[in-house]
Image (cartoon, rainbow, N blue to C red):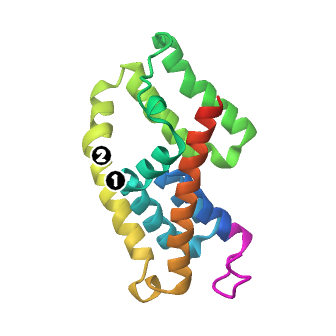
Amino acid sequence: TLNYFGLISFTLPQAAAIGIIGGADGPTAIYLSGKLAPELLGAIAVAAYSYMALVPLIQPPIMKALTTETERKIRMVQLRTVSKREKILFPVVLLMLVALLLPDAAPLLGMFCFGNLMRESGVVERLSDTVQNGLINIVTIFLGLSVGAKLVADKFLQPQTLGILLLGVVAFGIGTAAGVLMAKLL
């Protein structure tokens, strides 16, 4: 639609990479934009992480507009206790299913499953503690540096990048609204 008005134009893979910003998951946005639109990786990563940081500002007005005060006061309780065996089997079974059905997504979900398995198994407690604390901070710094290196200053304030930021916040808002509406439906 933006192309219709002569503003900016994106290819289908670029639009899909921009749309994943609505999922509010920075690593997925980086992974997908690296696969679909590597030329937009820097702008998409900046947009995704910016909106994730702005969750306390973006989501509350959307949630208040779509819910009643009574609904907002509902307290969720855990329906049942999840056993240790289930917590260990979940990442293993999930990774096998993803590897069979969606092999392209296996590396991304594999890291998620590996982290869960390390935490839940209790076998590598020291390694799990390091990954959850010190290592994640180091990786975040390197991720920021590498994404920043991909985003050259003279290309940042271009109409295309501003369009990505605009479409990203729209996708983020739609993702939030869809989540709230699905919760109300179910």
Q: Does the CB distance between marks 2 and 1 fall below 8 Å?
A: yes
For numbered disc 1, what is the local secondary structure? helix
Mark 2 surroundings within 10 Å by alpha-carbon count, few (fewer than 14), some (14 through 19), many (20 or more): some
Q: Is residue 18 above or below residue 112?
A: below
Residue linked to disc 2: 135
For residue 182, what is the image quadrant?
Answer: top right
Front residue of 84/126: it is: 84
- Would you say residue 37 is visible in this rendering? yes
Q: Is residue 90 above or below residue 179?
A: above
Q: What residue is at 36 percent from the left and 19 percent from the top?
A: 122
What stretch of residues is rendered in magenta? 1-13
- What kind of residue is marked 1? Val
Looking at the rendered image, the quarter that the N terminus falls into is bottom right
Specify the label residue 49 is tagged with.
none
- What kind of residue is marked 2? Leu
For residue 171, side relative to residue 15 (left or right): left
Rendering coords of residue 186 (x, y %):
64, 28
Rendering coords of residue 149 (x, y %):
39, 75
Rendering coords of residue 121 (x, y %):
42, 20
Q: Is residue 63 above or below residue 6?
A: above
Residue farthest to the front? 69
